Image: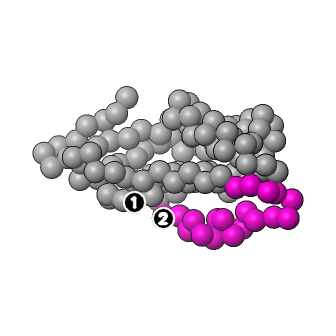
């Protein structure tokens, strides 16, 4: 599953759905809203371009790291402290490919996908570059 959504992510179901007798490793990244003196975070994106970019990243990661499956779910909208922002779940034959592939996907998302983040503060807001 590669998607951008407002709804929370059912991480346990995602893990269950990714299990396969053909894989020996899963790597999971869960990004959450932390308290950096903010009230919440607000995420916006250009949906069509962002989803297309996520699919391209997943395809590149599958090829480069020999991944069997790639799931990327990024949330948009206003998220409160401790809410899930991003889930990346990959499966592979071996742990090294799964861990390295998951890490590579995260960095590519941060570098290339047009998703914008705004800090919601007590006295206003601040957009990130």
Which percent across, then down, holds residue 28?
61, 54
For mark 1, give the secondary structure. Answer: loop
Q: Is residue 104 left or right of residue 83?
A: right
Q: Is residue 119 left or right of residue 123?
A: right
Contact (Cβ within 8 Å) of mark 2 with mark 1: yes
Q: Check the image and report above or below for 90 versus 100.
A: below
For the point 77% across and 38% down, which residue is it? 65
Residue located farthest toward the left when viewing the structure as drawn: 123
Name the residue tied to disc 2: 8
Q: Which sits earlier in the primary sequence, circle 2 or circle 1?
A: 2
For mark 2, give the secondary structure. Answer: loop
Q: What is the number of the mark on residue 83? A: 1
Bounds of the magenta span? 7-26
Which percent across, then down, holds residue 111?
53, 30
Q: Is residue 27 left or right of residue 85?
A: right
Pick whichever, 58 or 53, lies toward us: 58
Pick whichever, 114 or 83, lies toward us: 83
Q: Check the image and report above or below for 9 versus 36.
A: below
Q: Is residue 111 left or right of residue 81?
A: right
Which percent across, then down, holds residue 35?
28, 51
Residue located farthest toward the front when viewing the structure as drawn: 95
């Amino acid at each position: 599953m590669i998607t951008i959504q407002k709804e929370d992510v059912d991480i346990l179901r995602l893990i269950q759905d990714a299990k396969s007798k053909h894989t020996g490793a899963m790597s999971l990244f869960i990004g959450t809203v932390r308290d950096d003196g903010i009230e919440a975070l607000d995420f916006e994106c250009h949906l069509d371009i962002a989803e297309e970019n996520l699919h391209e990243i997943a395809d590149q990661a599958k090829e480069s790291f020999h991944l069997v499956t790639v799931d990327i779910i990024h949330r948009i909208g206003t998220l409160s402290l401790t809410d899930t922002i991003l889930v990346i779940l990959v499966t592979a034959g071996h742990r090294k490919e799964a861990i390295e592939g998951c890490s590579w996907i995260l960095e590519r998302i941060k570098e290339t996908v047009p998703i914008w983040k705004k800090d919601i503060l007590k006295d206003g807001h601040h957009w990130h570059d």
